[in-house]
Amino acid sequence: MKLDPWGPGQIEDYAKLRAEFGLGVVDKATWEGVKDPSPLFEREIVFAHRGLEPVVDAIRKGDPFGVMTGLMPSGKMHLGHKTVIDQCIWYQKQGADVHIAVADFEAYAARGFTIPDAQKLGLEEYVLTYLALGLDPKKAEVYFQTKRSRVKDLAYRLGLYVNWATMKAIYGFEDSVRLAHVNAPLMQAGDILHIQGTDLGGPRPTVVPVGVDQDPHLRLTRDLAAATRVFSVTETKDKKIGVFVKPEKPPRDVKTLLGDVEGILRRDLGYGDLKRNDAYRAIYVGGANPNDIARIDLALGQYEANELGEPGHFAPASTYHRFMTGLVAGPDGKPGKMSSSKPETAIFITDDPKDVEKKVKRAVTGGRATEAEQRRLGANPYACSVYELYLYHLANDKVLAEVYEECTTGKRLCGECKMQALDLTQAKLKEIREKREASRHLVKEIVSDQ
Ligand code: SF4
């Protein structure tokens, strides 16, 4: 199975993908002890993660954490896009600071947009809708890639830590690829990591909610974060000892560094059994286990940033959600994901109600060939794009359980089910459209001019 961040991206077997790529499971147990878990997690629409534990830990303890997301201003915002911002808003309610990059540079380089057009589309289609959906501008910022020089500077520096062979292995680039395209993942890594600058909150747990096709970017970014660090924190080969801390790229005298680290481990983190080996330039932390690596790494990242003037990047986490299925099948007869470039597959937030009606009425369902068969055998909600509308956006737990039960037992037919989904969709979109107009004055507040 191959993940392509620029490909069509409809994944058929999410469990297999999770196992194959070594992703963690996101389910109800992940959020134990967290107040009001989002239905997106409870319903396993967000189904996998990489390195999420420190973020969940920060939420449980009320510690600072950040969220980074981006938007590609090359088409209209649809309900599939809403899944990402719904997660960001939930994280924000849990205490996160939220950072949103408008990828105007990428829209220019990869999609042929002018920069002003991309910026206008980003604000009008996406940012306004984010505010309407409840994003609090006081704890969020939106910036344009073209205007934030520090992201471009960081992307340039990150290029020191990755070579062409690695980029080819991750992305499958051909020799004909344009260099602007090759640079795009470094820009994204710059976006993700720059929010750990000391003026933006410093090294702390951060999370990037994305579709699973974006995992290559996250793997690269996590590797780059580690590559820029002064210290490595790893499990010892002899598991009885614990973990060991080693300055890989000491910016100053190693003895002083080890002395500082010893202090942090003993005083701030409470580890008493330390063995310092100056010849090997390492400190063994007795009694620590692999579960302690993240908290040690975070404390050292903060030391690197605050005392050594280094980036101290703490590896960003990512969560992966299932794509919303397109409302109609593609030319091969198979449903793809909801896509801006295929308007018939998607319900756009700013769609005219008449278009919404046509699209829902035409949507592919998991219904049977005849009414009699459906009454007798029930239908299949898991093969139904209308059920996904309920699941992702329209139904509380009670309504969802009703739809599911009536669908699978044949009490409900697809025609009436579509009408209910249509009414709920129209009501939801009307509410968003009204809130968009009421939120216009907040755009200036949330958009950064650099
Ligand atoms: S009854 Fe509703 S949920 Fe079930 S297959 Fe038909 S449209 Fe989908």
Image (tube, rainbow, N blue to C red):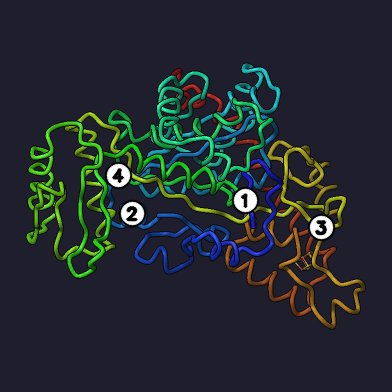
Task: Give the Cα separation between the discs numbered 4 and 3.
Answer: 43 Å
Name the N-terminal-most of marks 2 and 4: 2
Q: Which residue is mark 3?
A: 334
| Secondary structure type for disc 2 | helix
Q: Residues within 10 Å of mark 3 (few under 14, many from 20)?
A: few
- x and y percentages locating residue 333 in the rendered image: 86, 57
| Secondary structure type for disc 3 | loop
* Nearest the eye: 44 or 397: 44
Name the N-terminal-most of marks 4 and 3: 4
Find residue 257 and report its image quarter: top left
Q: Which residue is mark 1?
A: 3
Q: Which residue is mark 2?
A: 54
Q: Quadrant of ligand 1?
A: bottom right
Find residue 206 and report its image quarter: top left
Q: Residues within 10 Å of mark 2 (few under 14, many from 20)?
A: many
The label number, if any, that marks residue 64 in the structure image: 4
Q: Amino acid at mark 4?
A: Pro
| Secondary structure type for disc 4 | loop
Q: On the rendered image, what quadrant is the C terminus found in?
A: top left
Residue positioned 41% across, 44% down in the render: 223
